[in-house]
Image (cartoon, rainbow, N blue to C red):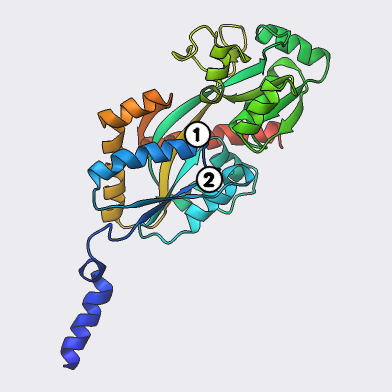
Amino acid sequence: MRKLFAIAMVLFFAIPGLVYGAYPSKPITIIIPSKAGGSTDTSARIFIVSAKKYLPEADFVIKNVPGSGGQKGFEEIARAKPDGYTIGMIFTTQVVAHVVAGRAKYTLDSFHVIGNMMQDPLIIAVPKDSPFKNMKDFAEAAKAGSLTVAVNGIGSDDFVAAKKFENLTGATFNLLPTKGSTEQKSLVLGGHVDASFMNVTQMHGQHKAGDARIIGILDTNRSEIIPDVPTGIEQGFSINMTATRGFVAPAGISKEVADTLDKLVADVMSDPDFIAACKKDVMLLLPMTGPDYLAYLEGLQAETQKFYDSTPW
């Protein structure tokens, strides 16, 4: 009996799958480091619909952890138990900006990077009655006097883009950090700010409806959803900035679980229904494998570090 008990205990601790069943055997929590209803939250909910096709035994639970430009959510993902039952979404530049600024209680090594899903180029949006018709008008006015410009928090992609614009043009903005894109939209639509640096998916509808005006997109090419808006480069301003949104898990998950999650994201990214749903909701896809996305994040962190060293915040 003692021998049988000893064998049972060895199996219990050495082969958890014999006791708990194959992964996943309980709901998988997806941490979203922002409020419900935002772009990252919406991306995750679209993902779940298709993910059930490829991992039908899984249930997914969204947990929104907003605060500090994503930092609270990133940290909760990093310190979660590495068993595959807590994963999360990250977004740039915030996930590396917090590290660069010395605020983060995590590093990129704190994560198993699963892969990227979305991209969202930056734009400059102004109220519909603004005198600024293009980025040249905007830059000249900004150099002549301080303009109030909304951004989504300190260290965000919006914030860094605004700072890069200041460095390039010699302008100095009165930067107004907000709690998210909803507040930014309200400020622009109400004419309470001179402009806002934000993502194209957050304001394209208002631009098309004539309720606001996008005067430039900070990408290498024009966007197919607002083809009338010239890039910054076309207008003589060499500033590129795009947000990305991808999946990570806590570092230390087993290879078996990591392989399952990596394959799941890759399968969903190739799923026709997922692609169609993203197109319908104007979500711009940018598939990257885990190794490719990690390399991208490492490069972005190095670039952001250089920028922070010259322009600390």
In this image, 17 relative to 210: left or right?
Answer: left
Task: Identify which residue is drawn at 45% across, 36% down.
Answer: 42
Q: Give the percent coordinates (x, y) of residue 51.
A: 30, 42
Q: Tell me if residue 244 comes above or below residue 194 in the rendering.
A: below
Q: Quadrant of residue 3 in the image?
A: bottom left
Regarding residue 218, the answer to whether it shows in the image is: no
Q: Give the percent coordinates (x, y) of residue 278.
A: 38, 28
Q: Secondary structure at mark 1?
A: helix
Q: Quadrant of residue 265 in the image?
A: top left
Which numbered dot is residue 39?
Answer: 1
Q: Quadrant of the C terminus?
A: top right
Q: Tell me if residue 152 comes above or below residue 220 in the rendering.
A: below
Q: Quadrant of residue 100 in the image?
A: top right
In this image, 197 relative to 82: left or right?
Answer: right
Give the label, 1 or 2, closer to the camera. 1
Three-letter residue code for mark 2: Pro
Q: Give the percent coordinates (x, y) of residue 299.
A: 49, 34
Of callouts 1 and 2, which one flags the residue occurring earlier in the amino acid sequence?
Answer: 2
Task: Identify which residue is drawn at 43% across, 24% down.
Answer: 282
Between 200 and 304, the residue placed more toward the observer is 200
Which numbered dot is residue 272?
Answer: none
Task: Identify which residue is drawn at 27% across, 49% down.
Answer: 260
Task: Identify which residue is drawn at 67% across, 6% down.
Answer: 133
Q: What residue does disc 2 label?
A: 33
